[in-house]
Image (tube, grey):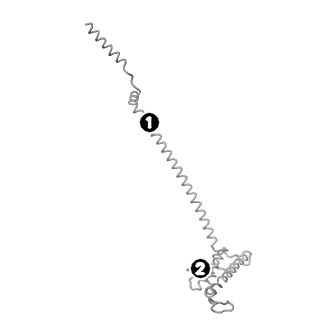
Amino acid sequence: MMSIGSKTTSAVSLRSMLSLHRPLPTTLSLRRLFSARDSRPINNTIISAWSSSSISARQTTKQFSKTTTDKAAKETISKMKETSDSTSSLSSFWKWYLGAREMPPRWTLPWYREMVLICTVFAITGSSTMVLVRPAVSKGLGLKGSLKDGPWSYRICSIVVMTPIYATLLVVVGTIFGRHHYFRHFSVKMWSRFGIPPEMLDETYHITKKNFRKW
């Protein structure tokens, strides 16, 4: 009996000793343990941090895009204003430049200046017309002669060719000197002698004719 009891006691003690000398859990098992326990809080924290950072990034992007859009819109509006101002100033200047000028009172200093300007325009236009008409009649039509000595074919062709050229140059030179409205009236009158209605060239011809002053 003693032998059996001693054997049993030794077996229990051996089991206890074996249980006490079990190997400690490895690092991998500890990581699994802690990760299994703390996985949800860690994941929630990471998700909340990531969502807050993404929201702030979106807000920053929206603010930046809005600021960029506002700057671009302001620049576009300023450019449009500058363009419209320059266009309006140019159109107003061109309207004034081509518009009618009131003839100054006679026998005054501004009136003398206006007469000198008008005579200068007529002189330049006449000289330029003669320079263009003579080669056109002699070389283009093959006619030789002059307005003084003839023949009549040369005189008639010179007058026919001279009138439209003179009327066109009169408007061009008059516009350069800032008197477009004044010399346009003479040009329309010359073209009307060829059977062209003056209303086709100038709608306000008859209205201008009533108050028109040559000098």
Task: Give the label on residue 137, or none.
Answer: none
Find residue 153 and report its horizontal and vertical position in percent: 62, 91
Left or right relative to 197: residue 215: right
Cβ–Cβ below 8 Å for labels 1 and 2? no
Determine whether 215 is above or below 29 in the image: below
Secondary structure under the numbered disc 2 in the rendered image? helix
Q: Nearer the viewer, residue 124 or 151?
A: 151
Q: Quadrant of residue 189?
A: bottom right
The amino acid type found where label 1 is placed reads: Ile
Q: Quadrant of residue 124?
A: bottom right
Mark 2 = which residue? 205
Q: Quadrant of residue 7?
A: top left
Residue at the spot x=27%, y=8% of the render? Answer: 3
Secondary structure under the numbered disc 1 in the rendered image? helix
Find residue 158 and report its horizontal and vertical position in percent: 63, 87
Find residue 129 and report its horizontal and vertical position in percent: 66, 82
**Label located before the other in sequence (1 or 2):** 1
Find residue 198 and report its horizontal and vertical position in percent: 57, 81
Task: Give the label on residue 46, or none.
Answer: 1
The amino acid type found where label 2 is placed reads: Tyr
